[in-house]
Amino acid sequence: MIVVDVKLACCPAARIDLPLYSLHCRLPPPTTTTQLTMAAAATSLANPAAFSSSLTRRCHHHQQVFPSIATLNVSNSTKQRSFKTLITSNPTLTRRPSVVAAATSDSSSSVSGASFHGTCYVVRDNIDTDQIIPAEYLTLVPSKPDEYKKLGSYALIGLPASYETRFVEPGEYQSKFSIIIAGDNFGCGSSREHAPVALGAAGVAAVVAESYARIFFRNSVATGEIYPLESEVRICDECKTGDVVTIELEQSLLINHTTGKQYTLKPIGDAGPVIEAGGIFAYARKTGMIPA
């Protein structure tokens, strides 16, 4: 895993972990993680020989040698907005500039760059990554379209039996719930990048939680799969699964059309453009940090 240190307005000390499958390759375990700044990452990708040499020097004490980065599939010829473009879009999703005025009790989902509208799925505190996507499904490779779809079908399958409503119905690949509302410490547990990817594959546009595990927040931004939004208050106590909600990103606002209540969200800050671009690599290309 490569780690890029960036400063985000919403989390100044945030560190983006670039997932292994973003490079379509296998690298040594996280113990050999190389710390790179965004500028260094851009320089390294532009100069493969120097990067490979640097990695070998840094990791010699692990008795492992990285393959030359020239052998890695980091082609820029295919520009995609995260792995979601690998599968057919959810037929219930449509795009429009804003949905606040047009939102009704209709449970169909719509998403745009500025807003998300659909039914919500409510979970409580400490939902860990093993509940989001159990370890037995981590052999699925998100860069393969068929396996990406399968990841979506297993999203939140590890929730306990107390959650009577299934997030994804048996036999389906995507969920009818496009927004997740959670309590404290969402995404705790292991650092698996499959967690936000599975939610994105299931059709989730955003998660609104009281707080996040830091690694899950970073992985959500790095993969560009979902928007990890934080609430000012504990919304999960006031919303129910099946409520129709709208999220307005520009206004940092969540509207529950079922109850008529509105909630202020914390601004997504500088992480927003990274997610909108489709993840850290897509953002780096878009902004000229690495060759487009």
Image (cartoon, rainbow, N blue to C red):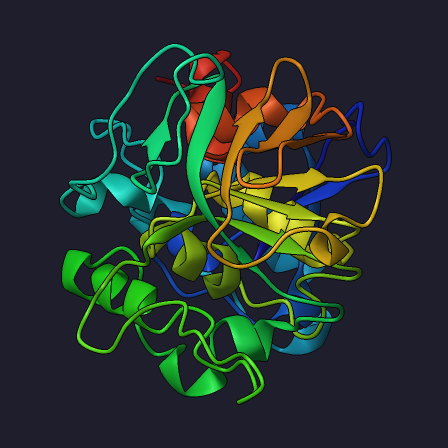
* Between 104 and 154, the one nearer to me in the picture: 104
Q: Residue at image x 80%, y 23%?
A: 9
Side of 276 where 128 appears, left or right: right
Query: Residue 291's x, y, as percent?
Result: 39, 18
Quadrant in the picture for the N terminus: bottom right
Query: Residue 82's x, y, as percent?
Result: 36, 39
* Between 108 and 260, the one nearer to me in the picture: 260
Side of 49 where 33 appears, left or right: right
- Residue 192 found in image quarter: bottom right
Q: Residue at image x 84%, y 42%?
A: 233
Number of numbered labels in the structure image: 0
* Between 98 and 83, the one nearer to me in the picture: 98
Q: Residue at image x 69%, y 22%?
A: 252
* Between 287 and 209, the one nearer to me in the picture: 209
- Residue 150 found in image quarter: bottom left
Side of 145 where 247 appears, left or right: right
Whether residue 262 is visible, yes or no, is yes
Whether residue 45 is visible, yes or no, is no
Query: Residue 10's x, y, as percent?
Result: 80, 29
